[in-house]
Amino acid sequence: MANKRVFSGIQPSGDLHIGNYLGAMVNWVRGQGEHDNVFCIVDLHAITVPQDPKILKKRILENAKMYLAAGIDPKKSTLFVQSDRPEHSELAWILNCFTYMGEMNRMTQFKEKSNQTKVRTEMKKILKKQKGYTTKYLEKRLDELKDAKTNTQEWFESVMLEIQKEQFDQEIEATIDNYFASNATVGLFDYPVLMAADILLYDTDEVPVGDDQKQHVEIARDIAKRVNNKFGKVFTVPEPIIKKEGARIMSLVDPTKKMAKSDDSENSYVLLRDNADTIYKKFARATTDSENVIKFDKEKKPGISNLLNIMSVATETPIPELEKKYADSNYGEFKKDVADCVIELLKPLQEKLAEYDKNEDYVRKVLKDGAEAVAPRAQATLERVKKAVGLGL
């Protein structure tokens, strides 16, 4: 029986961190002998938000180095750049014609990416300044009324001022909403259809994803089923594979949020190129709690739970075993040990990265060979789809 085909991709839109490595790449490497793996650097997805072309090209190469240094073996797995295979974008257009606006409007990542909190906060500050004396007057007068002895007239005035202030706030929110609605690109909105094309193009059986990406695999499944119901067996319907441990490595600063390079604080993530001193400092500053009890509880102890999760995946040790091991340890000792295991895990990867830094021509050749290797699969799927829907002669 043939091995199941697995498709995975990472955007070259930022430096890779241990969330990418522990949440995805480690599992890819461990499963190389068990699956027919297709790994893709999805640069078409990256340009759904503004990119510097020179930096993007560097990141594509850097991502390829990371894949190889992590243990992706070109003899066992296929590694290529998405835009080197034009079938991805051509299939995405066809799939657009079988995708409904209502489905796309429900995609949470579009809402998150097109409605960035940091940008909204800065825009609010600017717009409030533009309102000038009005909002300042309202806030000052409300403070005065709160300090004064309340009578009916003052109470009525405070209510009217609150209403007026709320109207200004709503006006500001509406202005920002309109800005994002008019400035988010069609590409960003259509991102899930391109992702569906990535997956369906290779008759993918399984897609390992974090729980935040599961929605995108679900829409790929819906589109595949819709096309199959209309034209017969055209696509393989993929299954999302989510590992419970390691699937979502959280921020070291705010363990209720996923670890992300876009975070304002450098202490929130550990980059794969960070040296030992930097890693020790970041884990030493990691958010925990005041109990000094090392126990896994995502709700009450998100910081400690995140550190346990990181150590569990890095050392392949079940969390209950780690809880027993550190039952009598304090947080400082535990944080140091988590840092130690991450440093040890990254050491061979960083040594290989240094080798690939000196031999970038080899990395480019791996990517070129990978694009050529997947060409027959991609072309065959696209021809099958075009024939099914009646395109061409």
Image (cartoon, grey):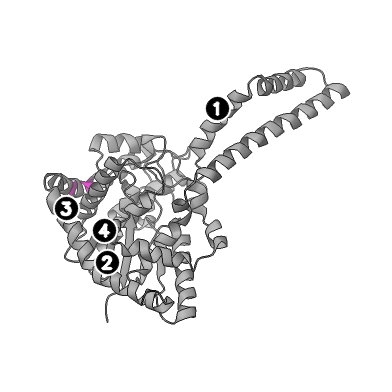
Which secondary structure, mark 3?
Answer: helix
Q: CA distance from mark 4 to mark 2?
A: 18 Å
Prevailing secondary structure of the magenta residues: helix
Q: Nearer the viewer, mark 3 or mark 2?
A: 3
**Sequence-earlier tag: 1 or 4:** 4
| Front residue of this view, candidates 82 and 318 | 82
Q: Quick one: label 3, few (<14), some, or many (20+) residues within 10 Å?
A: some
Q: CA distance from mark 1 to mark 3?
A: 46 Å
Mark carried by residue 126: 1
Tell me: 158 left or right of 225. Answer: right
Q: Quick one: label 2, few (<14), some, or many (20+) residues within 10 Å?
A: many
The kind of residue tagged 3 is Val
The kind of residue tagged 1 is Ile
**Sequence-earlier tag: 2 or 1:** 2
Name which quarter of the figure residue 100 lies in. Answer: bottom right
Residues in magenta, as a range: 344-348
**Residue at image point 31% right, 49% down:** 12
Disc 4: which residue:
84
Q: CA distance from mark 4 to mark 3?
A: 15 Å
The kind of residue tagged 4 is Asp
